[in-house]
């Protein structure tokens, strides 16, 4: 096996993991915006009437979410609250340069609960675009802010927002590894699993309730499926040799995995409970890093069967492989876009490993990042951003880039390496 291809299997090391009840992590991800999109939409978010009763203003969360997206320019209106039913001076807000305005009210409903009501206006048309109402406890101000930001994003772009989604990643601090789950903005990090040895390859179930991952408590790589609500888990793959790289089928019933039980690393499918193992492909090379197409028809994967690491696909029921990438000598870690139109992966370009996008219809490619040690790309559920791991100053950090390469973010903690990101699905109400 070629040395460069060994990076695909870097996590296959002996280890030991300890399951923990979810506990608030000490290290929160901090987000730095390193690039913004052109022609950002100017939006004003007025202070909500009554939000002073909350631990922090819910509008702080809304503003931070919209700013972080790189698609909006915030127009400040000052500290005066504007309620849901207020008579709004839309021409005045428009004169300040805002094309949209959000106002809202936070009203107590008793028993420590509040109702939040939001109204969004189109200022050029001087018309309401929509309203939203929800109930919350004071501790849920961040969750509520994310939902409001999603509402505004969808009304103004026509696409679902992803501010209410979650991400999973592995934090290494000293000898300790933690599988963490956090809000999409890096806040509210919780530790689902901790270990003195590596944890790798977290993958979200389509309904967002479970994570599949590889742990090493049996002194070998074993694939587990972990319920985030209960902390309970089951073994999904523990065969002879290594068990790695789990990927969920779109219906959440099956996992594609990489096993060495019959020799070299090859692709198999198993039920989420570990039953029904099925070999999907055979090759003289190493097949790894499977990912299902959104319609469930194909499984994309990395293989060196042609001599160098390239991306292939096979029917999800098994069969002959079709090569997908032809440019360059090193293309790995394929992840199809949620709508199936594009494929993101890591390519080597002049010695730099960078996130690259391919249009699956035209086969045109575009390098999206300017870093040099990118790994593990993962699409946001609306397909507009890609989360990935990279290295800056010798430390592992997470970063995100928009699908057009214009918007860039960096997520890091003050101490420790952050790796192995996975962006979760849209929450189901």
Image (cartoon, rainbow, N blue to C red):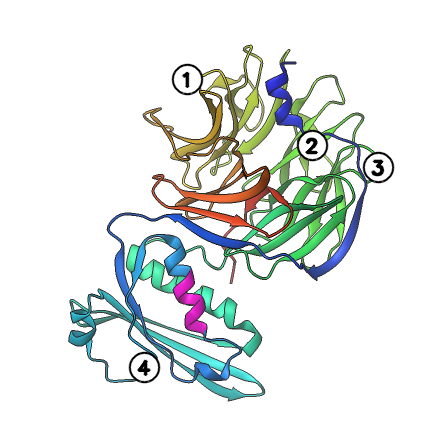
Q: Which residue is mark 2?
A: 11
Residues 413 and 45: in front is: 413
| Tag 1 secondary structure | loop
Residue at (46, 44) in percent of width and height: 400
Q: Which residue is mark 4?
A: 82
Question: How far separated are the C-alphas under marks 2 and 3?
Answer: 15 Å
Residues 255 and 397: in front is: 397
- Lateral position of residue 270 relative to residue 315, left or right: right
At which x and y percent is residue 10? 67, 28
Please give the range of residues in magenta: 58-64
| Tag 3 secondary structure | loop
Earlier along the polypeptide chain: callout 1 or callout 3?
A: 3
Question: How far separated are the C-alphas under marks 4 and 2?
Answer: 53 Å
| Tag 4 secondary structure | loop
Residue 138 sits above or below residue 241 on the image: below
Determine contact: label 3, label 4, CB under 8 Å. Answer: no
Earlier along the polypeptide chain: callout 4 or callout 1?
A: 4
Residue 327's disc is 1
């Amino acid at each position: 096996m070629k040395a460069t291809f060994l990076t695909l299997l870097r996590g296959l090391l002996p280890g030991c993991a300890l399951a923990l009840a979810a506990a608030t992590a000490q290290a929160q991800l901090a987000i730095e915006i390193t690039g913004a999109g052109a022609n950002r939409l100017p939006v004003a978010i007025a202070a909500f009437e009554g939000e002073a009763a909350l631990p922090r203003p819910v509008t702080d969360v809304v503003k931070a979410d919209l700013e972080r997206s790189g698609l909006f320019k915030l127009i400040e209106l000052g500290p005066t609250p504007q309620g849901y039913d207020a008579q709004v001076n839309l021409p005045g807000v428009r004169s300040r340069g805002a094309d949209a305005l959000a106002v809202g009210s936070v009203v107590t409903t008793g028993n420590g609960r509040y109702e939040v009501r939001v109204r969004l206006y189109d200022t050029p048309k001087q018309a309401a675009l929509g309203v939203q109402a929800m109930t919350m406890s004071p501790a849920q101000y961040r969750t509520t802010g994310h939902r409001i930001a999603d509402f505004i994003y969808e009304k103004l772009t026509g696409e679902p927002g992803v501010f209410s989604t979650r991400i999973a990643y592995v934090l290494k601090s000293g000898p300790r590894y933690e599988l963490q789950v956090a809000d999409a903005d890096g806040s509210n990090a919780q530790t689902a699993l901790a270990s003195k040895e590596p944890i790798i390859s977290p993958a979200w179930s389509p309904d967002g309730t479970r994570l599949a991952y590889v742990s090493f408590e049996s002194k070998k790589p074993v694939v587990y499926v972990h319920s985030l609500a209960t902390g309970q888990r089951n073994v999904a793959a523990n065969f002879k040799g290594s068990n790695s790289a789990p990927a969920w089928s779109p219906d959440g019933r099956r996992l594609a995995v990489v096993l060495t039980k019959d020799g070299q690393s090859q692709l198999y499918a198993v039920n989420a409970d570990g039953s029904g193992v099925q070999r999907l492909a055979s090759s003289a090379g190493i097949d790894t890093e499977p990912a299902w197409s959104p319609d469930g028809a194909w499984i994309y994967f990395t293989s060196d069967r042609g001599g160098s690491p390239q991306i292939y696909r096979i029917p999800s029921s098994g069969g002959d492989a079709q090569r997908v990438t032809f440019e360059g000598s090193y293309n790995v870690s394929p992840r199809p876009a949620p709508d199936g139109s594009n494929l993101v992966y890591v390519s080597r370009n002049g010695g730099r490993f960078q996130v690259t996008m391919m249009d699956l219809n035209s086969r045109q490619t575009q390098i999206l990042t300017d870093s040099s040690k990118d790994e593990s790309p993962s699409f946001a559920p609306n397909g507009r951003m890609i989360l990935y791991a990279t290295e800056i100053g010798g430390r592992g950090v997470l970063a995100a880039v928009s699908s057009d390469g214009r918007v860039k973010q960096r997520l890091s903690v003050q101490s420790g390496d952050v790796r192995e990101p996975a962006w979760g699905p849209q929450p189901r109400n």
